[in-house]
Image: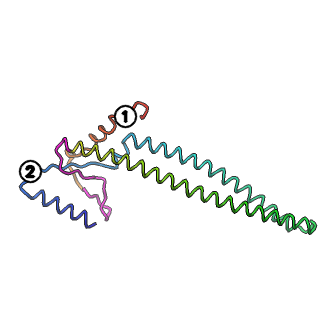
Amino acid sequence: MKSWKTAVLALLTMLSTAQAAEFKAAVIDMDRVLQEYYKTKIVEGNLKRQADIYKDYAKKLGESLTKLQSEFVALRDSSQNIALSDAARESKRMAAQDKYKELAAKELELRTYNREKQAQLRDERDRERAAILTDIRKTIEAHAALAGFALVLDKSALSASAMPVVPYSAKSIDITDNVIKELNTGRKKSDK
């Protein structure tokens, strides 16, 4: 919180100097840029497809787990059936113990699978997002340099008190549309 206050103080100091007439600032809606960049939609689609594949497999593991639970309950219950001989009940009890071990192993497999796949998806999302943000940052930097902007602020950013960091900006200094257009210029027909 102290760093943004320092940045605002430095900005105000710069604006109050004789160089203020040369100082140009712009604003951008980073949330909108991120959402409207075609690569974001591609990455989100790919991650969703991968998550669906993981969910399908987890569902199959869950169905297998449910079947094992039913088999275990049936064996456990039959091991307590007094109509059976002692030897038959003991055999059912041993089978129930073995089935319980299978059940515990399947539960562990499902938990481990879910944890690993969630971590993989999170890592992949973070990697892809970092690449997208690098593209966006480079485009903003190039646009700002060409237009002579010394500073570009994110008008979608919120302060610690959930207030906009940039509560007002003139439409004339908003570069959001231009940056989105530049980012999507390289779009292939198949990326729509």
SS under mark 2: helix
Label 1 or label 2, whichever lies nearer to me, is: 1
Quadrant of image for the N terminus: bottom left
Q: Does the magenta stretch include residue 148?
A: yes
In magenta segment, residue 171: no
What amino acid type should be assigned to the residue bearing mark 1?
Answer: Arg
Determine the residue positioned at 82% across, 62% down: 95
Nearer to the camera, 136 or 165: 136
Image: 153 above or below 38: below
Real-space Cα separation, disc 1 to disc 2, in angstroms: 38 Å
> Circle 1 — which element?
loop
User: Tell me, what colour scheme is on the image?
Assistant: rainbow
Residue at mark 1? 187
Q: Main secondary structure of the magenta part?
A: loop
Residue 94 lies, in percent from the top left, at 82, 65
Task: Determine whether 163 is above or below 26 in the image.
Answer: below
Q: What stretch is highlighted in magenta?
A: 145-166
Q: Residue 89 falls in which quadrant of the image?
A: bottom right
Residue 145, horizontal then vertical, whole percent: 20, 44
Indicate left or right for 74 with 136 as reference. right
Relative depth, front residue between 124 and 171: 124
Circle 2 residue: 21
Task: Identify the residue at horizontal 21%, vertical 48% (top origin).
Answer: 26
